[in-house]
Amino acid sequence: MSLLQERAELAGSARQRRERPTMTRSAQARRARRIRHLKDHLVAYGLLSPALAVFVVFFYVPAAYLVYISFFHWGVLSSSTSFVGLENFRRLFAQPLFWHALATSGYYTLVMIPATTLLALGISLVLKEAVTARRGGVWRAAVFLPHVTPVVATSIIWVWIFNPQFGLANFVLEKLHLPALGWLDTTQWALPAVMIDSLWHSLGLYVIIFLAGLANVPRELVEVARLDGARRSRIFRRVILPLLSPTTFFVVILATVNSWQAFSQIYTMTGGPHGGAGGPAFSTTTDALLVYQTAFSFDHFSLAAAMALVLFVIILLLTVIQKWISNKVVFYR
C-alpha cells in the first residue's frame, strides 16, 4: 500500500511539473496582451491629445467662461467683476431688439432649411448620372467650389450684384421686363438678398452630402421596382426617399445650425462696422449679429454672453426636437 501511495505521489508531482510551464506560459501570454493593449491605448491617446488639447483650450474653456461671465457684470478693461445673478437675462428679455432679432433668426432659419434641403436634393438627383460618369469629379468640384470660397469676398461680389443702379440682379429683371428692386436698401428685400447669398454659398456642401447618400442606395431595389412597373415618382417616394432619410436628417441638422449662426454674409452685405450691419432698420439683425454688436460695439460682454447662452439653448432644443422627430420618420437599414 505504501508503494502504491509513493507511485501515486510521484506521478502527481510529475504531472504538476508538466502542467506548471503550461500555466506559466498562459499567464505570460495574458500579461503580454495586457501590456500590448496598454501600449495601444497610450499611443491612441497620445495621437488624440493634440486635438483634445485644441478642443479644451479653444472650445470647452471659453464656453465654460462664457457661462461664468453671463452671471457677472464683466468687462474687458474692468479690473473688478460683480456677481449679478440673472440680471443680465432679465435685461436681455426686456429688450425688444432681442425678440426682433430672435424672430428674424427664426424666419431666416425656416426659409433656409427647406430651400437648401429641397434644392440640394434636386440638384443631386440631376447630377447623379453625371457623377457616375467619367467626368463626375469635375461636376463635384464645380458644385462644391462656392462653398470653399471665402464668405466675405463672395459677399462683397453679391453686394455689387444687388447694387440698385448697375447691379446684375436689376439688369436681369429689366431684361425680363420686371420692376427693379431696392434689394439691400429696403427692409422688404434685404433679408431675401442675404438668403440668396447664403444659399449660393452653402448649397454645394449639401449637394455633395446628398450625392454620397444616393451612392449608397442599392441599385437592386431600384431595378426591382422598375421591373414591377413602378414609375419614377413612385420609386423616388417609396424606395429612394426612405433610404435617403438619414442623409436628409443630417442635412436638416446642419442647415439648422448654420442658419442660426449666420453672421459673415449678413455683416458684410449690410454695411459692416461703418455702414450699420443688420440694416436697414434692423431688418437683417439676427441673434448672432446682435451678440457681436452687443459685445464689440456696445462693450457689454456680460449681456452678449447671456445672449450667446440663450442662442446655444435654442439650437440645442431644436436639435433635440429634430432628433425626436427623426426617431419616427428616419429609416436606418
Image: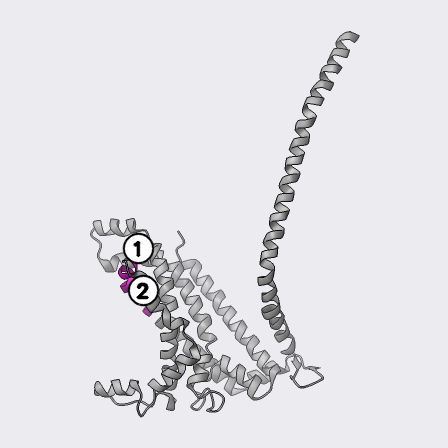
Q: Quadrant of the N terminus?
A: top right
Q: Nearer the viewer, residue 295 or 55?
A: 55
> What distance separates the C-alpha of mark 2 from that of mark 1?
28 Å
SS label for mark 1: helix
The picture places residue 325, in percent across and down from the top left corner, at 43, 62
The picture places residue 245, in percent across and down from the top left corner, at 37, 59
Q: Residue at x 50, y 71 (%)?
A: 315
Span colored in magenta: 118-132
Relative placement, left or right, of 193 versus 286 is left
Q: Residue at x 33, y 62 (%)?
A: 137
The picture places residue 17, in percent across and down from the top left corner, at 71, 22
In the rendered image, which quarter is residue 305 located in? bottom right
Q: Amino acid at mark 1?
A: Val
The picture places residue 161, in percent across and down from the top left corner, at 33, 85
In the rendered image, which quarter is residue 116 located in? bottom left
Residue pointed to by mark 1: 239
Q: Residue at x 61, y 64 (%)?
A: 53
Q: Nearer the viewer, residue 124 or 130?
A: 130
Q: How many numbered callouts?
A: 2
Disc ID at residue 138: 2
Question: How crowded is the residue under tag 1: few (<14 C-alpha within 10 Å), some, or many (20+)?
Answer: some
